[in-house]
Image (cartoon, helix red, strand yellow):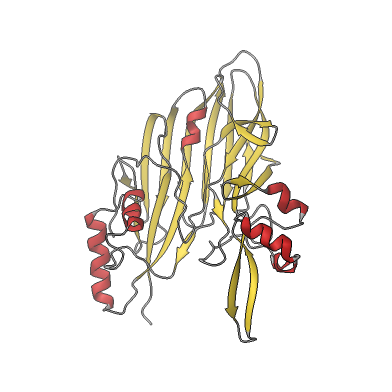
Amino acid sequence: MTTAFTTLFLGLAALLAPLAGASANDSTAELAAGGLVLTRTADIEMRSEDLYVSAKEIRVGYRFFNRAAQDRTVTVAFPMPDVTLDFIDGMTAVPHPGSENFLDFSTKADGKPVATEVEIKAFGNGVDQTALLRKLGVPMYPDADYDGLTALPKAKRDELIGLGLAAVNEFDSGKGWEQHVVPMWTLKTTYHFQQTFPAGREVVIEHRYTPGTGESVGSVVGSSYAVGTPEYADDLRTYCIDQGFLAAVGRAKAKAGQDGMPFSEQRVSYILTTGANWAAPIKDFRLVIDKGDAKNLVSFCADGVKKISPTQFEVRKTDFTPGAELNVLILRPIPPQ
């Protein structure tokens, strides 16, 4: 097992193919015209954040403190990384298909369940086209039934394609050559809820959900044909992949033989930087990365990493202001055929 740990890479949350799904730090928000807008607060500080990240589950607990003389009721928002519905190049695994809450997101405040709303917007070529898709009755969330796109009048199908919301997928599934219109829009998803923070008191907020983990059958990490490409260079930077990690991959490839495929990939991302929207730096920050199996390889960007179990790695920070997002790469050995 090899891990790669350096200083946090300053960049945006990675959206990779296959897609890397994940979530984000809480941030206060206001429901402005046109949708949810994140704001800053001068009264409520995040005293601690305890974050657990794995390919199967993400859970996070916060302790907030309202240092104002009055109670504060605000909209708390939890934005997700963008999800691009690409049915031609491949989609991410959807943990709970057929629902707008496709990550099975849940929230508790001081141990009690909180009713959480979800806002979903669809963008094509960078333009919000949510109203158009809703008018057409098209479901926007991943893994829905999109046969209705193909059934639309040709003028509407052409309009969606021209707006970057759809594309034509051609294939032969044994019944002859078929053409289907498939979604290509980008989803921006934000969970939000109203929360009162009493003056001079702590409130504990907890989230739990299943990440839409980007997966692949094989891995380009360490492959000779990928080395030197911009995409490969991005992977090296995004996950802080070092020579030790590449050496471990190389040894596994050599053992598997020329035609062997020793690893499958899992990619998980998490938006940390919205944690800077509170009144002060995070006083006590703890991160645990769980690679799932002792035989797996894991790489992510962080410093001060401590191994606390055969599969778990811990990072602790004091007075922490997140300056970058968290991206985790897990390579899982493929059993020999």
Residue drawn 70% across the image and 64% down it: 149
Q: Would residue 254 be found to the left or right of residue 331 on screen?
A: left
Residue 82 visible within the image: yes
Q: In this rendered view, identify the residue nearer to me: 123 or 287.
A: 123
Residue drawn 59% across the image and 75% down it: 170
The percent position of residue 221, horizontal first and vertical second, equals: 32, 62
Q: Which image quarter is the C terminus in?
A: bottom left
Residue 205 location, quadrant: top right
Residue 327 to residue 172: above or below: above
The single residue placed furthest to the top in the displayed view is: 69
Residue 310 visible within the image: no
The percent position of residue 123, horizontal first and vertical second, equals: 61, 49
Residue 294 to residue 67: above or below: below
Residue drawn 52% across the image and 42% down it: 24
Q: Which image quarter is the N terminus in?
A: bottom left
Q: Would residue 192 be found to the left or right of residue 262 on screen?
A: right
The percent position of residue 332, horizontal first and vertical second, equals: 38, 65
Residue drawn 52% across the image and 66% down it: 90
Residue 317 location, quadrant: top left
The percent position of residue 269, horizontal first and vertical second, equals: 46, 49
Residue 86 location, quadrant: bottom right
